[in-house]
Image: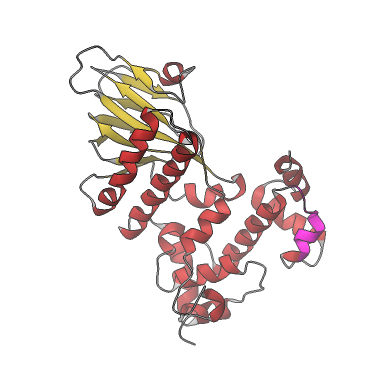
Amino acid sequence: MSGTPEYLLDRPGDRVDPLSEVLTLLDVRAALPSRFEAGGRWALRFERHHHVKVGALLAGRCWLTPEGAEPVLLRPGDCYLLASGRPYTSASDPEVEPVDGHAVFEGVHPGTVRHNVAAGDLEPTILVGGSVTFDETAAALLLDHLPPCVRIGADSHRAQVLRPILELLGEETAGDAPGSMVMREQLTQILFVQALRTLLIADELPGWLGALTDDSVGVALAAIHREPARHWTVAELAAVAGLSRSTFALRFKTLVGLPPLDYLGRWRIRSAARALRSGERTVGSVAAEFGYGSESAFSNAFKRVTGHPPARHRRVAGG
C-alpha cells in the first residue's frame, strides 16, 4: 500500500499536521505575559514553574540558567523556552547573587516590572514572556521530550519570521491599550508554537516529538491521532506508513519510545480524558466512544495511564 489514505487528508494533496493535532489535544493555554525591565547588575531566582515559560529578549543581555544546566546567553531578538519546570535564574551576569524573583514580581505583574532601574541607564534589559500550560493528562507527552532551555537565535530564519511578533508583543506589554490582554496571550502562544517548530525543523528533538516529522512514523502517528478509537493493528499502521510490519514496528519503537499499540492505548486514554474534561459526559458514554467493551475495562486502562480513575478525573475537570 502506498500513498496517504483519504482519512488522513483534509482535502486532496494535504497531509494531516501531527503537531497541530497534538497541540489541540494538549489544550495549550497562555497566562498573561509580563514585561521586565532591569538595569545595572542584577539576578533573580524563580522556584519551580508549571509546564513551560516562553519569551524573548528585546534589549540588553540576559543569562538564563535552569537548575542543573549550563547558562544560556540571550541577546536582543533571541527567543527562549524553559520547559523542565526546574527552578531557574535570570541574570545580567551568572556570577551575581540572585534575589527572590517572585517577590520582585509580586503585586506588579501583569504590569511592567522594573528592577534596579536608575535614571540614565544606557542599556536596560527588557524581557517579555509568560507561562504556557497544558491539559495535565497529556502534558507528559510534550514535556518529557523537551530540553530544559531552548534558545532561538535572532539571526536564525525562524527568529526573523518572529520579528514582527516580537515588536508587537513589545508594544502590547509597554502599554494598556484596549484588548491588550488577549493580544498578549495569543502572541505568547505563537512564540511557544514557533519554538517547537524550530526544534522540529532542526531535527534536534529525540523521541516522540522528533517522530512527528518522520516521513513514515509521522504519518502513522497522524492516523492514530485522527482515529484513536479505531482498533488499529500493527500491520494496518505499517501499511499507512508505507513500511513492512517488522521495519515499521522497530522504527516506531526506536523513535517514539513505545511499541505502536502501547502508544495507541495511551493516546486513546488521553483523548478520552479530554472528552471527560468538560464534566458533561458520563464515563460509560466515553468508554463506548473510544471502543472499550465495558466501563470497567475503560476504568482499568484509564487508571493505568493516568494514575487515577476516570470518575475522579471527570469530577476534578468539571470543578
Q: Give residue 312's quadrant in the image.
A: top right
Q: Residue at x 51, y 54 (%)?
A: 23
Above or below: residue 122 compared with residue 143: above
Count of numbered tags: 0
Name the dominant secondary structure of the magenta segment.
helix
Say which of 47 and 226 sits in front.
226
Say which of 120 and 144 sits in front.
120
Magenta region includes residue 54 = no
Q: Is residue 114 visible?
A: yes
Residue 240: % across, % down: 51, 79
Which residues, given as a range, are shown in magenta?
279-288
Quick check: 225 left or right of 307?
Answer: left
Say which of 257 and 111 sits in front.
111
Above or below: residue 64 compared with residue 232: above
Above or below: residue 31 compared with residue 165: above
- Tell me the quadrant of the picture where the C terminus can be found: top right
Magenta region includes residue 285 = yes
Q: Give residue 59's quadrant in the image.
A: top left
The residue sitting at the front extreme is 178
Quick check: 58 left or right of 66?
Answer: left
